[in-house]
Amino acid sequence: MPELAELRLTSDYINEASDQVQYTNIEKNPVHKGKDVDTPFEFFKITSKSRGKELLLTMHNLKNNDKKSMLMLMGMSGHFKLTRKGEEPKHAHLKFISEEDGLTLSFVDVRRFGRWMDNESFSENRGPDPTTEYEDFKDNICKNINKAAFNYPIYEALMNQKYFNGIGNYLRAEILYRLPELNPFMSAREALNIEPKIFNLCRDIPRQAYIKGGGQLKDWENPFKTESSQFEKFMKCYGNPNMSRVKDKNGRMFWYDPKWNNKEER
């Protein structure tokens, strides 16, 4: 699933690819269960920004200052691709078409878990982005540290988007692996109290992943076609056959240092 770094790269790609494109209509693939989308303006341009695991796509009316936004959730495999009109990828489920330029910006979603909704801002039920709203991110956790969400092990709590917006499966593994003295199975409350470096790593590891070009995940690849070797060197834990694995409460695989297999240490 695309995480914070991949959403940031996707947003960069949309802004760069669409910079000089004049869009004229939107088409939804009827096989996708996402809501129908009306073309908002006769001629419009598209800009994008990301926050954690969300993407806000804004369409700007080229005849006046009107605009309309869509909140995009990428699901397991969602990404965008700009192609010539008529050359859209097989799993293009939402198409922003430019008749003038003969181009299509497609939302490609192989597994169809992505969704979109009319929204002029990011979701209120997700926390601040740890890379761009760091102080708010810390404050949101500290003022809620006594809530039940922090009773869970830190490896579980890191997936809670209400507090750790943008952190996903590979990022939590890399964050916790870089804290070798911290037991990933202790409660989140205890872990955050004894190891404040977690806050910094929730900011720094996604930033590094972004700089390295993001994860070349199963159904996602960097839209800029960046060489993946830098990212592979950056990954120390997730997907490493020398690491241990356990399923979390939602069935997602957590990768961790095998030294924590000793039940006494847990």
Image (cartoon, rainbow, N blue to C red):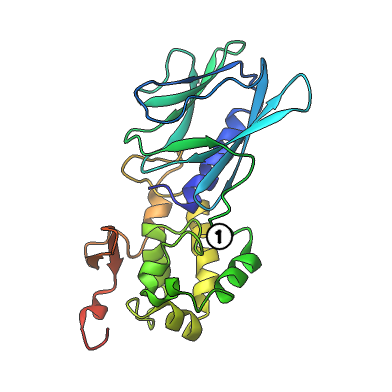
Residue shown at 58%/29% (left/top)? 17
Residue 242 horizontal side relative to residue 39, left or right: left
- Across and down, in percent, residue 64 comes to 79, 23
Q: Nearer the viewer, residue 131 or 247?
A: 247
The kind of residue on which mark 1 rests is Gly
Give the answer, above or below, for where 56 lies relative to 229: above
**Local crowd at mark 1 within 10 Å, few (<14), some, or many (≥20)?**
many
| Outermost residue toward the bottom in this view | 264
Report which residue position mark 1 lands on: 127
- Across and down, in percent, residue 204 comes to 53, 65
| Outermost residue toward the right in this view | 64
Residue shown at 38%/20% (left/top)? 30
Residue shown at 44%/37% (left/top)? 115
- Across and down, in percent, residue 220 comes to 38, 40
Say whether residue 224 is visible.
Answer: no
Give the answer, above or below, for where 94 lies relative to 120: above
Say whether residue 84 is visible.
Answer: yes
Say what secondary structure mark 1 lies in.
loop
